Image (cartoon, rainbow, N blue to C red):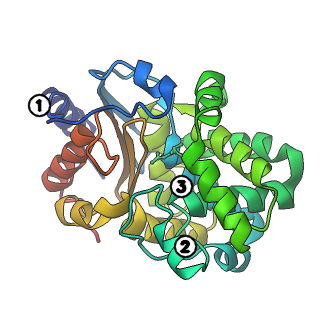
Amino acid sequence: MENRQELQSLLDRTAAVCRSLTGDGRQATYIPELATVDPTLFAVSAVTLDGAVLSSGDTEARFSMQSMSKVMSLAFALERLGYGEVFSHVGMEPSSEPFNSIMKLEMTSAKPLNPFINSGSIVMAGLLAERLGSGVIKDMLDFASRMTGNKGGLVVNERVYMSESSTADRNRALAYFMHSSGTLSFDVEKSLDLYFRLCSIEVGTADLAVMGATLANAGKNPVTGERITSLDTSYTVLGIMSVCGLYDESGEFAVKAGIPAKSGVSGGIVCAVPGRMGLAVFSPPLDKGGNSVAGMETVSRLSRELKLRGI
Ligand code: GLN
Protein backbone atom coordinates (compact mmCIF):
# COMPACT_ATOMS: atom_id res chain seq x y z
CA MET A 1 0.00 0.00 0.00
CA GLU A 2 1.07 3.56 -0.72
CA ASN A 3 2.32 5.79 2.10
CA ARG A 4 -0.22 8.66 2.09
CA GLN A 5 2.09 11.32 3.52
CA GLU A 6 4.84 10.54 1.04
CA LEU A 7 2.37 10.50 -1.84
CA GLN A 8 0.86 13.86 -0.79
CA SER A 9 4.30 15.43 -0.54
CA LEU A 10 5.26 14.02 -3.97
CA LEU A 11 2.05 15.50 -5.48
CA ASP A 12 2.84 18.89 -3.88
CA ARG A 13 6.42 18.89 -5.18
CA THR A 14 5.41 17.74 -8.66
CA ALA A 15 2.61 20.33 -8.85
CA ALA A 16 5.01 23.14 -7.85
CA VAL A 17 7.42 22.22 -10.66
CA CYS A 18 5.04 21.09 -13.39
CA ARG A 19 2.32 23.75 -13.30
CA SER A 20 4.49 26.12 -15.34
CA LEU A 21 5.90 23.50 -17.73
CA THR A 22 3.48 24.33 -20.52
CA GLY A 23 6.13 25.09 -23.16
CA ASP A 24 4.45 26.75 -26.12
CA GLY A 25 1.21 24.86 -25.43
CA ARG A 26 -2.11 26.63 -26.18
CA GLN A 27 -5.52 25.94 -24.72
CA ALA A 28 -8.21 24.76 -27.16
CA THR A 29 -10.22 27.57 -28.74
CA TYR A 30 -12.17 25.73 -31.46
CA ILE A 31 -14.87 25.18 -28.83
CA PRO A 32 -15.36 28.86 -27.81
CA GLU A 33 -16.26 28.08 -24.20
CA LEU A 34 -12.91 26.32 -23.66
CA ALA A 35 -11.12 29.54 -24.64
CA THR A 36 -12.63 31.29 -21.57
CA VAL A 37 -10.86 28.97 -19.08
CA ASP A 38 -7.91 30.36 -17.07
CA PRO A 39 -4.87 28.71 -18.71
CA THR A 40 -2.78 28.96 -15.53
CA LEU A 41 -5.01 26.56 -13.58
CA PHE A 42 -3.29 23.35 -12.53
CA ALA A 43 -4.51 20.44 -10.40
CA VAL A 44 -3.39 16.88 -9.80
CA SER A 45 -5.08 14.07 -7.82
CA ALA A 46 -4.17 10.52 -6.86
CA VAL A 47 -6.56 7.90 -5.47
CA THR A 48 -5.07 4.80 -3.87
CA LEU A 49 -6.76 1.42 -3.87
CA ASP A 50 -7.36 1.67 -0.11
CA GLY A 51 -9.53 4.69 -0.85
CA ALA A 52 -7.35 7.73 -0.05
CA VAL A 53 -8.10 10.78 -2.24
CA LEU A 54 -5.11 13.14 -2.37
CA SER A 55 -4.89 16.36 -4.41
CA SER A 56 -2.63 19.34 -4.98
CA GLY A 57 -2.82 22.65 -6.87
CA ASP A 58 -6.11 24.33 -7.83
CA THR A 59 -8.12 21.44 -6.46
CA GLU A 60 -11.48 23.26 -6.81
CA ALA A 61 -11.06 23.67 -10.59
CA ARG A 62 -13.97 22.22 -12.60
CA PHE A 63 -13.71 21.49 -16.31
CA SER A 64 -15.45 19.46 -19.01
CA MET A 65 -14.49 15.83 -19.52
CA GLN A 66 -14.23 16.19 -23.31
CA SER A 67 -12.61 13.01 -24.64
CA MET A 68 -12.01 11.63 -21.15
CA SER A 69 -15.77 10.90 -21.17
CA LYS A 70 -14.98 8.23 -23.78
CA VAL A 71 -13.50 6.05 -21.02
CA MET A 72 -16.74 6.15 -19.08
CA SER A 73 -18.86 5.71 -22.25
CA LEU A 74 -16.92 2.62 -23.29
CA ALA A 75 -17.24 1.09 -19.82
CA PHE A 76 -20.98 1.87 -19.81
CA ALA A 77 -21.52 0.45 -23.31
CA LEU A 78 -19.65 -2.75 -22.46
CA GLU A 79 -21.73 -3.20 -19.31
CA ARG A 80 -25.08 -2.51 -20.98
CA LEU A 81 -24.63 -3.90 -24.48
CA GLY A 82 -21.73 -6.35 -24.17
CA TYR A 83 -18.37 -6.78 -25.84
CA GLY A 84 -19.73 -8.37 -29.05
CA GLU A 85 -22.14 -5.58 -29.89
CA VAL A 86 -19.71 -2.76 -29.02
CA PHE A 87 -16.85 -4.14 -31.13
CA SER A 88 -19.11 -4.92 -34.06
CA HIS A 89 -19.37 -1.11 -34.47
CA VAL A 90 -15.84 0.07 -33.59
CA GLY A 91 -12.35 -1.46 -33.67
CA MET A 92 -9.69 -1.60 -30.97
CA GLU A 93 -6.56 -0.47 -32.81
CA PRO A 94 -4.59 2.78 -32.50
CA SER A 95 -5.25 5.27 -35.29
CA SER A 96 -1.95 7.19 -35.49
CA GLU A 97 -4.07 10.10 -36.78
CA PRO A 98 -5.39 13.26 -35.06
CA PHE A 99 -8.48 12.69 -32.91
CA ASN A 100 -10.85 14.32 -35.40
CA SER A 101 -9.37 12.81 -38.56
CA ILE A 102 -11.59 11.70 -41.40
CA MET A 103 -8.81 10.21 -43.55
CA LYS A 104 -8.85 6.54 -42.57
CA LEU A 105 -12.66 6.43 -42.74
CA GLU A 106 -12.56 7.56 -46.33
CA MET A 107 -9.70 5.27 -47.28
CA THR A 108 -11.15 2.07 -45.86
CA SER A 109 -14.92 2.73 -45.38
CA ALA A 110 -14.61 0.24 -42.52
CA LYS A 111 -15.71 0.89 -38.93
CA PRO A 112 -13.79 3.54 -36.92
CA LEU A 113 -10.46 2.21 -35.65
CA ASN A 114 -11.29 2.59 -31.95
CA PRO A 115 -13.88 4.08 -29.55
CA PHE A 116 -11.56 6.91 -28.36
CA ILE A 117 -11.24 8.87 -31.62
CA ASN A 118 -14.15 11.18 -32.39
CA SER A 119 -15.56 9.02 -35.21
CA GLY A 120 -15.60 5.91 -33.00
CA SER A 121 -17.08 7.78 -30.08
CA ILE A 122 -19.86 9.32 -32.21
CA VAL A 123 -20.77 5.82 -33.45
CA MET A 124 -20.81 4.56 -29.84
CA ALA A 125 -23.06 7.46 -28.81
CA GLY A 126 -25.40 6.68 -31.71
CA LEU A 127 -25.53 3.02 -30.72
CA LEU A 128 -26.29 3.87 -27.09
CA ALA A 129 -28.93 6.48 -28.01
CA GLU A 130 -30.67 4.04 -30.35
CA ARG A 131 -30.58 1.03 -28.03
CA LEU A 132 -31.32 2.79 -24.73
CA GLY A 133 -33.62 5.63 -25.86
CA SER A 134 -34.06 9.14 -24.52
CA GLY A 135 -33.22 8.21 -20.90
CA VAL A 136 -29.68 7.29 -21.89
CA ILE A 137 -28.02 10.55 -20.77
CA LYS A 138 -29.59 10.26 -17.30
CA ASP A 139 -28.37 6.63 -17.02
CA MET A 140 -24.89 7.60 -18.15
CA LEU A 141 -24.68 10.54 -15.72
CA ASP A 142 -25.71 8.18 -12.94
CA PHE A 143 -23.08 5.63 -14.04
CA ALA A 144 -20.40 8.35 -14.27
CA SER A 145 -21.35 9.67 -10.81
CA ARG A 146 -20.97 6.19 -9.32
CA MET A 147 -17.71 5.54 -11.18
CA THR A 148 -16.23 8.85 -9.92
CA GLY A 149 -17.86 8.56 -6.48
CA ASN A 150 -19.26 12.09 -6.96
CA LYS A 151 -21.83 12.45 -4.17
CA GLY A 152 -23.76 15.43 -5.56
CA GLY A 153 -24.05 13.79 -8.98
CA LEU A 154 -22.24 14.85 -12.15
CA VAL A 155 -24.04 17.17 -14.57
CA VAL A 156 -23.64 18.45 -18.11
CA ASN A 157 -22.19 21.98 -18.29
CA GLU A 158 -24.88 23.54 -20.51
CA ARG A 159 -22.66 26.42 -21.66
CA VAL A 160 -19.99 24.02 -22.92
CA TYR A 161 -22.65 21.81 -24.52
CA MET A 162 -24.22 24.76 -26.37
CA SER A 163 -20.83 26.10 -27.39
CA GLU A 164 -19.72 22.73 -28.67
CA SER A 165 -22.90 21.80 -30.52
CA SER A 166 -23.15 25.17 -32.25
CA THR A 167 -19.58 25.10 -33.59
CA ALA A 168 -19.16 21.42 -34.47
CA ASP A 169 -18.63 21.52 -38.22
CA ARG A 170 -15.85 18.95 -38.04
CA ASN A 171 -17.79 16.44 -35.92
CA ARG A 172 -20.88 16.95 -38.08
CA ALA A 173 -18.75 16.31 -41.17
CA LEU A 174 -17.44 13.10 -39.62
CA ALA A 175 -20.92 11.91 -38.64
CA TYR A 176 -22.62 12.72 -41.96
CA PHE A 177 -19.73 11.15 -43.85
CA MET A 178 -20.03 7.97 -41.79
CA HIS A 179 -23.79 8.00 -42.30
CA SER A 180 -23.37 8.27 -46.05
CA SER A 181 -21.06 5.27 -46.12
CA GLY A 182 -23.18 3.17 -43.73
CA THR A 183 -20.57 3.18 -40.93
CA LEU A 184 -22.96 5.17 -38.75
CA SER A 185 -26.34 3.52 -39.18
CA PHE A 186 -28.08 5.55 -36.45
CA ASP A 187 -29.82 8.93 -36.43
CA VAL A 188 -26.99 11.43 -37.04
CA GLU A 189 -28.27 14.34 -34.95
CA LYS A 190 -29.20 12.10 -32.00
CA SER A 191 -25.73 10.50 -32.15
CA LEU A 192 -24.05 13.92 -32.14
CA ASP A 193 -26.30 15.34 -29.44
CA LEU A 194 -25.43 12.57 -26.98
CA TYR A 195 -21.76 12.81 -27.95
CA PHE A 196 -21.69 16.60 -27.23
CA ARG A 197 -23.49 16.16 -23.90
CA LEU A 198 -21.03 13.48 -22.76
CA CYS A 199 -18.02 15.66 -23.71
CA SER A 200 -19.58 18.49 -21.64
CA ILE A 201 -19.92 16.60 -18.33
CA GLU A 202 -18.19 18.68 -15.67
CA VAL A 203 -15.61 17.15 -13.30
CA GLY A 204 -12.61 17.91 -11.11
CA THR A 205 -9.34 15.98 -10.93
CA ALA A 206 -10.49 14.10 -7.78
CA ASP A 207 -13.54 12.76 -9.72
CA LEU A 208 -11.33 11.61 -12.57
CA ALA A 209 -8.74 10.02 -10.29
CA VAL A 210 -11.50 7.99 -8.60
CA MET A 211 -12.68 6.92 -12.07
CA GLY A 212 -9.13 5.81 -12.88
CA ALA A 213 -8.83 4.05 -9.54
CA THR A 214 -12.07 2.16 -10.21
CA LEU A 215 -10.55 0.74 -13.40
CA ALA A 216 -7.23 0.12 -11.62
CA ASN A 217 -9.18 -1.77 -8.95
CA ALA A 218 -10.73 -4.25 -11.44
CA GLY A 219 -14.03 -2.33 -11.71
CA LYS A 220 -14.74 -1.71 -8.00
CA ASN A 221 -14.76 1.91 -6.79
CA PRO A 222 -12.14 1.89 -3.98
CA VAL A 223 -13.67 4.94 -2.24
CA THR A 224 -17.32 3.87 -2.11
CA GLY A 225 -16.72 0.10 -2.29
CA GLU A 226 -19.35 -0.20 -5.04
CA ARG A 227 -18.73 -2.55 -7.97
CA ILE A 228 -19.16 -0.43 -11.12
CA THR A 229 -17.99 -2.76 -13.89
CA SER A 230 -17.04 -6.39 -14.32
CA LEU A 231 -13.40 -7.43 -14.28
CA ASP A 232 -13.59 -8.07 -18.04
CA THR A 233 -14.93 -4.57 -18.75
CA SER A 234 -12.11 -2.99 -16.72
CA TYR A 235 -9.52 -5.04 -18.61
CA THR A 236 -11.00 -4.08 -21.98
CA VAL A 237 -11.07 -0.36 -21.14
CA LEU A 238 -7.51 -0.47 -19.74
CA GLY A 239 -6.33 -2.18 -22.91
CA ILE A 240 -7.83 0.49 -25.16
CA MET A 241 -6.43 3.25 -22.90
CA SER A 242 -2.97 1.67 -23.21
CA VAL A 243 -2.84 1.85 -26.99
CA CYS A 244 -5.30 4.63 -27.97
CA GLY A 245 -5.46 7.04 -25.00
CA LEU A 246 -3.48 9.99 -26.36
CA TYR A 247 -4.37 9.78 -30.06
CA ASP A 248 -1.31 10.02 -32.31
CA GLU A 249 0.88 10.63 -29.25
CA SER A 250 -0.10 7.34 -27.59
CA GLY A 251 3.25 5.77 -28.49
CA GLU A 252 5.28 8.69 -27.13
CA PHE A 253 3.24 8.68 -23.92
CA ALA A 254 3.72 4.91 -23.54
CA VAL A 255 7.48 5.47 -23.74
CA LYS A 256 7.49 8.44 -21.34
CA ALA A 257 4.90 7.35 -18.76
CA GLY A 258 4.00 3.75 -19.56
CA ILE A 259 0.54 3.69 -17.99
CA PRO A 260 -3.01 3.43 -19.39
CA ALA A 261 -4.42 6.95 -19.79
CA LYS A 262 -6.93 9.12 -21.65
CA SER A 263 -6.66 12.81 -22.47
CA GLY A 264 -9.24 15.48 -23.33
CA VAL A 265 -8.99 18.87 -25.06
CA SER A 266 -10.07 20.65 -21.87
CA GLY A 267 -6.53 19.85 -20.64
CA GLY A 268 -7.19 16.83 -18.44
CA ILE A 269 -5.58 13.40 -18.41
CA VAL A 270 -7.06 10.47 -16.47
CA CYS A 271 -4.84 7.45 -15.72
CA ALA A 272 -5.39 4.00 -14.26
CA VAL A 273 -2.44 2.07 -12.84
CA PRO A 274 -3.69 -1.50 -12.35
CA GLY A 275 -3.29 -2.69 -8.77
CA ARG A 276 -1.83 0.66 -7.62
CA MET A 277 -3.89 3.86 -8.11
CA GLY A 278 -5.87 6.29 -10.25
CA LEU A 279 -4.32 9.60 -11.26
CA ALA A 280 -5.69 12.74 -12.89
CA VAL A 281 -4.16 16.04 -13.88
CA PHE A 282 -5.57 19.27 -15.34
CA SER A 283 -3.69 22.05 -17.14
CA PRO A 284 -5.36 23.64 -20.22
CA PRO A 285 -2.40 24.43 -22.55
CA LEU A 286 -2.19 21.66 -25.17
CA ASP A 287 0.48 20.48 -27.57
CA LYS A 288 -0.21 20.04 -31.29
CA GLY A 289 -1.69 16.56 -30.66
CA GLY A 290 -4.35 18.06 -28.33
CA ASN A 291 -2.78 16.72 -25.13
CA SER A 292 -1.99 18.76 -22.00
CA VAL A 293 1.71 19.66 -21.98
CA ALA A 294 2.05 20.01 -18.19
CA GLY A 295 -0.31 17.06 -17.75
CA MET A 296 1.89 14.69 -19.76
CA GLU A 297 4.98 15.88 -17.90
CA THR A 298 3.27 15.45 -14.52
CA VAL A 299 2.16 11.89 -15.24
CA SER A 300 5.60 10.99 -16.63
CA ARG A 301 7.31 12.30 -13.48
CA LEU A 302 4.86 10.56 -11.12
CA SER A 303 5.27 7.33 -13.08
CA ARG A 304 9.04 7.50 -12.73
CA GLU A 305 9.02 8.47 -9.02
CA LEU A 306 6.43 5.88 -8.02
CA LYS A 307 7.59 3.15 -10.45
CA LEU A 308 4.13 2.93 -11.99
CA ARG A 309 5.21 1.81 -15.45
CA GLY A 310 3.12 -1.15 -16.51
CA ILE A 311 2.72 -1.24 -20.30
N1 GLN B 1 -15.52 17.44 -27.73
C1 GLN B 1 -14.24 17.38 -28.36
C2 GLN B 1 -14.40 17.24 -29.87
O1 GLN B 1 -15.27 16.58 -30.29
C3 GLN B 1 -13.47 16.22 -27.81
C4 GLN B 1 -12.09 16.08 -28.42
C5 GLN B 1 -11.02 15.77 -27.42
O2 GLN B 1 -11.15 15.94 -26.22
N2 GLN B 1 -9.88 15.35 -27.93
O3 GLN B 1 -13.69 17.79 -30.64
Secondary element at image label 1: helix
- Residue at image location 63% in from the left, 67% down from the top: 230
Residue type beneath disc 3: Val
Residue type beneath disc 1: Val
Which x, y percent locates residue 298?
Answer: 21, 42
Q: CA distance from mark 1 to mark 2?
A: 43 Å
Which x, y percent locates residue 180?
Answer: 72, 67
Q: Which residue is mark 1?
A: 17
Can residue 194 be seen in this snapshot? yes
- Identify the mark at residue 71; answer none if there is no mark: 3
Q: How many marks?
A: 3
Secondary element at image label 3: helix
Left or right of residue 145, residue 16 in this image: left
166 above or below 84? above
- Residue at image location 67% in from the left, 38% down from the top: 197
Please tell me whether mark 1 or mark 2 is closer to you in this view: 2
User: Label 1 neighbourhood size at 10 Å, few (<14), some (14-19), many (20+)?
Assistant: few
171 above or below 178? above
Which x, y percent locates residue 19?
Answer: 19, 29
Q: 285 and 245: which one is in front?
A: 285
Split into 4 quadrants, where in the image is the C terminus? bottom left
Residue type beneath disc 2: Glu
Q: Earlier in the sequence, mark 3 or mark 1?
A: 1
Q: Earlier in the sequence, mark 1 or mark 2?
A: 1
- Residue at image location 43% in from the left, 18% down from the top: 36
Secondary element at image label 2: helix
Q: 10 and 21: which one is in front?
A: 21
Q: Which residue is mark 2?
A: 106
- Identify the mark at residue 9; answer none if there is no mark: none
User: Label 2 neighbourhood size at 10 Å, few (<14), some (14-19), many (20+)?
Assistant: few
